[in-house]
Amino acid sequence: MSINFSDLSRGMVIELDGAPWQIMDYERHKMQQRAPVTRIKMKNLLNGTVVERAFQQYQTSFAVAQVENREAQYLYNDGRFYHFLDQENYEQYEIAKETLGSALGYLKEEMIVEVVFYKGNPISVNLPTHVDLKVTDTPPAFRGDTAQGGNKPATLETGLRVNVPMFITNGSIIRVDTRTGAYTERVS
């Protein structure tokens, strides 16, 4: 299926140069007496690279990639692969550690995610917007210690490091935004 620039939207997956690309941002510039320039910022779903490309044609068309999202539960990792269980047909999928990239900091066992399939093979995961994680290591807060804006570093159960407010202690469960990697609120 082919689409034009006017049909593009953020999050849509197009096929370009034989690979699936997710559109992060797009715009079109039209200057007098020149062909319009279509600029697209996109992420390669196979290797995670983000690029910005410009297309200089009057009729720019794109092919929609045949990707499928399936709900799956994260089971475990064996050091090299991360294993997921499909919630419909109970099939198991494995995705290489290198492919998951920054999503590794948010994955914990028994978590439900969307596994993205391209041509029948699992290529990445879509995380929920917010994840609740336990703080495993953070320095204690001292009275009057607000020279750095009242934040301190914390290491979470998955190994992810975020800045948290001074009142957060070891063992606290906090909510983290997976899009920005920032602390949102304390859960308990």
Image: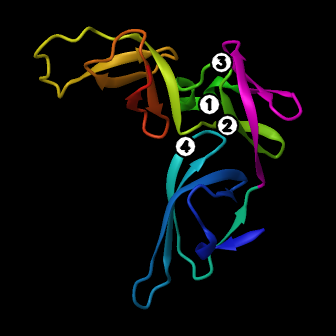
Q: Real-space Cα distance between discs 2 and 4? A: 13 Å
User: Where does label 2 land, which residue?
Assistant: 124
- Residue 76 among magenta residues: yes
Question: Is 74 one of the magenta-colored residues?
Answer: yes
N-term-proximal mark, 1 vs 3: 1
Q: Residues within 10 Å of mark 1 (few under 14, many from 20)?
A: many
Mark 2 falls on what kind of element?
Answer: strand
Name the residue that disc number 1 marks.
100
N-terminal of the pair, mark 3 or mark 2, is 3
Q: Amino acid at mark 3?
A: Glu
The residue stretch that appears in magenta: 66-94
* Labelled pair 1, 2 in contact (Cβ < 8 Å): yes
Position of 59 relative to 17 (above/below) = below
Mark toward the start of the polypeptide (1 vs 2): 1
Nearest the camera: 126 or 62? 126
**Which residue is labeled 3 in the image?**
109
> Disc 1 or disc 3, which is closer to the eye?
3
Secondary element under disc 3, as helix, strand or loop, is loop
Q: CA distance from mark 1 to mark 4?
A: 12 Å
Figure quadrant of residue 148: top left
Q: Which quadrant: the C terminus?
A: top left
Kindly report the secondary structure that dominates the magenta region of the rendered protein: strand
**Residue at position x 44%, y 82% from top?**
30
Q: Viewed as shown, does residue 104 lie left or right of 69?
A: left
Whole-number angstrom distance, CA of label 1 to CA of label 3 = 15 Å
Q: CA distance from mark 1 to mark 2?
A: 6 Å
On screen, residue 156 above or below 87: above
Give the label, 1 or 4, closer to the camera. Answer: 1
Q: Find disc 4 in the rendering and name its residue.
A: 49
For the residue labelled by badge 4, is the local secondary structure a helix, a strand or a loop?
A: loop
The residue lying toward the viewer, choosing from 171 and 8, is 171
Residue 147: image quadrant is: top left
